[in-house]
Amino acid sequence: MHTLEPTGIYLSGYSPGAGEQSILIPYVEITRIRKISLAENIVSGLNLFKPGIVEEYEGVVGDPLHFVMIETEKGRYLTRGDDLDEFVVQANQRLAEYRKTST
């Protein structure tokens, strides 16, 4: 579960290992937000001609393997929700607004 807050993205039920907790990822720490598919990334990770995490996945809406990846300097966070496409658009808009006002 994720929500957009004025200062960052709030992840509830974030699991950094064994225990669950909630975390606020400040916009200042976020480098990139995008939608990915774990299935596509697993397959492309095995393909020598296309290694790593793919740029975007245009699959079926509601695919259980769709996630939003929030990248920071410290690491990556995966989250799921109802309308991932809309969340990515809104999150990137808020991130762009934050960057405009903070410079």
Image: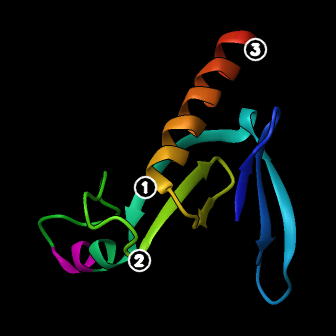
Taking the image as shown, residue 52 lies to the left or right of residue 98, namely left
Applied colour scheme: rainbow
Residue 90, percent across and down? 56, 36
Quadrant holding the N terminus = bottom right
Q: Could you give the CA–CA distance between mark 1 and mark 3, rounded to whole angstroms?
A: 25 Å
Viewer can see residue 103: no
Q: Earlier in the sequence, mark 2 or mark 1?
A: 1
Q: Could you give the CA–CA distance between mark 3 and mark 2, rounded to whole angstroms?
A: 35 Å
Residue 55, percent across and down? 31, 51
Span shown in magenta: 43-47
Residue where numbered disc 2 is placed: 65
Quarter of the image holding residue 51?
bottom left
Q: Is the residue 45 above or below the residue 9 in the image?
A: below
Quarter of the image holding residue 23?
bottom right
46 within the magenta span: yes
Q: Quick one: 8 or 74, which is closer to the camera?
A: 8
Q: Secondary structure at mark 3?
A: helix
Identify the residue at image location x=80%, y=66%.
Answer: 12
Instruction: Please give the label number shown on residue 35.
Output: 1
Q: Is the residue 97 above or below the residue 27 in the image?
A: above
Identify the residue at image location x=49%, y=37%.
Answer: 89
Q: Could you give the CA–CA distance between mark 2 and mark 1, rounded to whole angstroms?
A: 10 Å
Q: Amino acid at mark 1?
A: Lys
Q: Secondary structure at mark 1?
A: strand
Instruction: Please give the label number shown on residue 102.
Output: 3
For the residues bearing labels 2 and 1, Cβ distance under 8 angstroms: no
> Of tags 1 and 3, which is closer to the observer?
1
Identify the residue at image location x=31%, y=53%.
Answer: 56
Q: Earlier in the sequence, mark 3 or mark 2?
A: 2
> Of tags 3 and 2, which is closer to the observer?
2
